[in-house]
């Protein structure tokens, strides 16, 4: 990579005091002196001395930038905060637990230079217990089928991006799992690359199996936002017109029974009320869709909620 091309290496960090010194040393050993790069560590409210170590190391490491959350906000928030503050041509993200191999950074950047906008790592030979591999495989298969994005490992922390990709992403909650989906739905060229995955050396995983259940709800959010954010009437209007059609059909049937066959209303009062309720529900769905269209047109881009963030640069002690 030429010196004129800049690179930001973003590392979300939460209670990784034992791992982070080794990871930073590895990154420096991999990156050639001709590389124009920086390392952006986002401390996500660590309580084990991670932040104190990074703050001290920053005094002697001119490549290191430090962002601190005063409490734990999660990986998506950490990535979003870093993405807001970087201006490099390329961005690489990786986890702080030493399972992602910094040796993969140059090949991933080369992949970007081939013309791709996002390169997602694929931990094909995953060094995790079966209890983590099986739920992950099911999660990835489900996501691939529902989104049409043909990636094997959506949640791999090792990814490489072009600048315009990270600036276009709105990630929050658990959306970091679906960054390839969000980028793909925006029209960016997304690919994957098999990467080395190493066993965890220190501590325990910060994520439990419940994250996959939460992830499925996040997937529903991603699908809705990618398909209907700018056209909510397409979704609510569909349900509204179906409800209207069924409701009107039911009521017409009741009217036919009354005036065509002479049956009393009292015999079909429940069916009549059901039809009226469906009509009302249909009108409400359509109204919600129209209201959503107006909101989408006028306030599509809203401000982010404030976070308790401290940015450490060369002037911050």
Image (cartoon, helix red, strand yellow):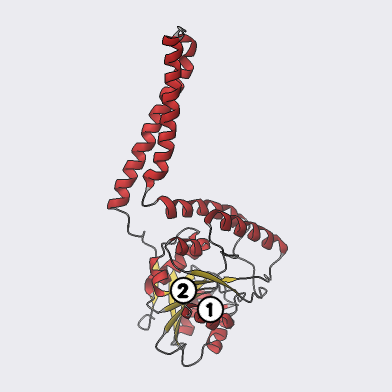
Q: Position of residue 146 (x, y in %)?
A: 55, 53
Q: Is residue 11 above or below residue 245?
A: below
Question: Which residue is drawn at the image coordinates 43% and 64% (left, top)?
Answer: 187
Q: Seen from this angle, which residue lies furthest front?
A: 260
Q: Is residue 305 above or below residue 12?
A: above
Q: Earlier in the sequence, mark 1 or mark 2?
A: 1
Question: Which residue is drawn at the image coordinates 64% and 74% (left, top)?
Answer: 197
Q: Seen from this angle, which residue lies furthest right?
A: 130
The C terminus - image quarter: bottom left
Measure the alpha-carbon separation of dots 1 and 2. Answer: 9 Å
| The one of 222 and 130 positioned closer to us in this rendering | 222
Q: Seen from this angle, which residue lies furthest left?
A: 298
| The one of 129 and 246 positioned closer to us in this rendering | 246
Label annotation for residue 161: 2
Q: Position of residue 30 (x, y in %)?
A: 55, 87
Question: Circle 1: is it few (<14), some (14-19), or many (20+) Cα within 10 Å?
Answer: many
Question: Circle 2: is it few (<14), some (14-19), or many (20+) Cα within 10 Å?
Answer: many
């Amino acid at each position: 990579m030429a010196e004129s091309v800049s690179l930001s290496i973003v590392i979300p960090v939460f209670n990784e005091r034992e791992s982070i010194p080794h990871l930073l040393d590895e990154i420096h050993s991999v990156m050639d002196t001709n590389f124009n790069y920086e390392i952006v560590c986002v401390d996500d409210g660590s309580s084990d001395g991670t932040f104190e170590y990074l703050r001290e190391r920053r005094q002697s490491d001119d490549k290191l930038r430090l962002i601190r959350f005063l409490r734990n906000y999660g990986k998506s928030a950490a990535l979003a905060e870093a993405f807001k503050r970087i201006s490099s041509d390329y961005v690489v993200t990786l986890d702080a637990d030493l399972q992602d191999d910094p040796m993969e950074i140059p090949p991933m950047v080369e992949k970007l230079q081939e013309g791709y906008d996002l390169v997602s790592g694929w931990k094909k030979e995953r060094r995790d217990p079966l209890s983590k591999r099986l739920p992950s495989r099911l999660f990835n298969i489900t996501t691939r089928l529902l989104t049409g994005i043909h990636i094997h490992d959506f949640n791999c922390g090792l990814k490489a991006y072009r600048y315009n990709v990270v600036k276009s992403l709105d990630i929050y909650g658990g959306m970091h799992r679906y960054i390839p989906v969000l980028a793909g739905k925006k029209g960016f060229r997304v690919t994957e690359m098999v990467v080395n995955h190493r066993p965890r050396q220190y501590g325990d995983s910060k994520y439990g199996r419940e994250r996959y259940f939460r992830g499925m709800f996040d997937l529903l959010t991603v699908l809705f936002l990618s398909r209907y954010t700018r056209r909510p009437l397409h979704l609510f209007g569909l349900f509204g017109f179906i409800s209207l059609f069924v409701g009107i059909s039911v009521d017409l049937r009741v009217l036919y029974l009354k005036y065509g066959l002479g049956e009393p209303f009292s015999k079909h009062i429940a069916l009549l009320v059901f039809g009226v309720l469906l009509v009302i529900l249909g009108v409400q769905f359509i109204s919600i869709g129209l209201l959503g269209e107006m909101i989408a047109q006028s306030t599509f881009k809203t401000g982010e909620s404030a976070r308790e963030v401290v940015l450490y640069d060369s002037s911050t002690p």
